[in-house]
Image (cartoon, coloured by chain):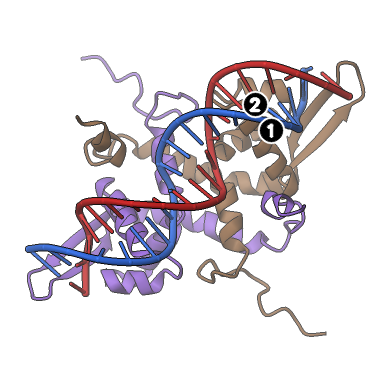
Chain colours: A purple, B brown, C red, D blue
Amino acid sequence: MVTAPDRRGDLFDPSCPTRQLLDRISGKWVAMIIKTLAESGELRWSEVKRATPGVSAKMLAQTLQSLEGDGLVARRVEPTVPPAVHYSLTPLGESLDEPLAALRAWAEDHMHEIDPLGTPASAARRP
Amino acid sequence: MVTAPDRRGDLFDPSCPTRQLLDRISGKWVAMIIKTLAESGELRWSEVKRATPGVSAKMLAQTLQSLEGDGLVARRVEPTVPPAVHYSLTPLGESLDEPLAALRAWAEDHMHEIDPLGTPASAARRP
DNA sequence: CGGGATCCCCAATGATACTG
DNA sequence: CAGTATCATTGGGGATCCCG
């Protein structure tokens, strides 16, 4: 048999799925949702929503579907009425929590060292 | 004076700069540029561009300015003609490379475990 | 309760052309 | 060489309504 030429991804190869995967896990709400699920274990949809300040219903559903599609989050439906849907991390999702936690920690640690006037956002607001 | 109540950031606080900072370092080209500079030390603008397949001049300039504004990248101009501009990581930028490298490694390691049919991209491409 | 469907807006991204 | 300016595109993301 031939060994796969790309057993491991290459971020610098435009045709490699790694880039899209990295984009998806870099989504605006992913870091928060993963952390919440990593700490709480299993949560209902509305609990995840309450734990994620500022997220809209649409973005939460969309993000959870994306994470489920990537096998990072497991979805469990209880056939009650009204239905209760629970979300939890898969082992793969838990493995993502580690590097993501490092990035969150870095951002929380260094947010005071960034120059508030040097950011594009504040610069663009200058008339 | 009052001591700052938020010596460390809180990602879950919508008014905390941590979220914007995390958004900026999650930019589409940041991971690649940081890695390139971390490995090469100091590079010219055109070298960074060549090392970042797919990036446009606009996005490269914009991303580099953003990183410079956040104090992650240092810009050095040599007053020759034509001018030569060099970019390198600051110590802060090097400290970001560590968590970012972990995330890159995770993406490259697990790109094969994601279900290609479960992703929004591939689902949308289905006619 | 947990979404799906729809409409709409603006910010991010990109292609192209121009300049110090 | 190292950008900036301009224009065109897109799709992220919020608001709203509806359904099982």
Q: Which residue is mark 2?
A: B57
Left or right position of C20 against B92: right
For label 1, the SS is helix
From this viewpoint, is residue B81 visible? yes
User: Residue A16 at what x, y percent from top left?
Assistant: 39, 27
**Marks 1, 2 in one chain:** yes
Q: Which mark is residue B61?
A: 1
For label 2, the SS is helix
- Residue B119, image quadrant: top left
Quarter of the figure that contains the N terminus of chain A: top left
From this viewpoint, is residue B106 visible? no
Going by the numbered disc 1, the residue's amino acid type is Ala
Query: Looking at the image, is B26 positioned above or below residue A45?
Result: above
Going by the numbered disc 2, the residue's amino acid type is Ala
User: Residue B100 at what x, y percent from top left?
Assistant: 55, 45
- In the displayed image of the protein, which residue is found farthest to the right? B79
User: Residue B109 at what x, y percent from top left?
Assistant: 38, 37
- Residue A7, image quadrant: top left
> Is A53 or B72 nearer to us in this picture?
A53
Q: Residue at x 33, y 64 (%)?
A: A57
